[in-house]
């Protein structure tokens, strides 16, 4: 599946164990009612753990991901797990200050 949104947070890489590391890319998704933001945290693990750090807050991205669920102790846990991120549109540039000539 693919989804587009604006990056609102990138978590640092968390080395959970010798074999498992994770990082999250948090997106603000488009919504019809801005009073109720639609936010999604997408987990990146192991070989893909460094992908989120390549993007900046405020940048519009498209993420390829899958939804996985697992049961533990009678409870179910669902995760959006990403494997690819690409920038959408042009990068936002900071305005430059122009000095007036006298």
Image (tube, rainbow, N blue to C red):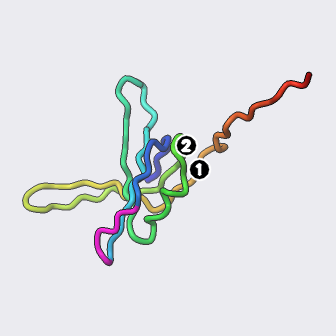
Residue 13 image-quadrant placement:
bottom left
The mark nearer the N terminus, 2 or 1, is: 2
What is the spatial separation of the Cα atoms under label 2 and label 1, in whole angstroms?
6 Å
Q: Residue furthest front?
A: 102
In this view of the protein, which residue sits in the foreground, 51 or 69? 51
Give yes or no for contact between labels 2 and 1 (Cβ–Cβ under 8 Å).
Answer: yes
Residue 75: where, in percent of width, then height? 11, 55
Q: Residue furthest right?
A: 102
Residue 33: where, in percent of width, then height? 40, 24
Query: Which residue carries the number 2 mark?
Result: 60
Q: In the image, which disc is placed on residue 87?
A: 1
Give left or right: position of 90 versus 58. Answer: right
The residue drawn where x is 43% and y is 65% is: 49
The residue drawn where x is 65% and y is 44% is: 91
Q: In the image, which disc is placed on residue 67?
A: none
Task: Characterize the magenta stretch by its predominant secondary structure.
Answer: loop
Dot 1: few (<14), some (14–19), or many (≥20) neighbours within 10 Å? some
- The residue range painted magenta reads 13-18
The residue drawn where x is 8% and y is 61% is: 73
């Amino acid at each position: 599946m693919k989804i587009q949104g604006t990056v609102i947070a990138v978590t640092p890489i968390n080395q959970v164990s010798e074999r498992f590391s994770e990082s999250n890319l948090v997106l603000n998704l488009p919504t019809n009612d801005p009073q109720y933001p639609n936010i999604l945290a997408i987990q990146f693990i192991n070989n893909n753990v460094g992908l989120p750090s390549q993007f900046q807050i405020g940048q519009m991205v498209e993420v390829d991901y899958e939804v996985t669920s697992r049961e533990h102790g009678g409870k179910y846990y669902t995760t959006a797990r990403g494997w690819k991120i690409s920038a959408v549109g042009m990068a936002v540039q900071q305005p430059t200050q122009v000095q007036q000539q006298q």
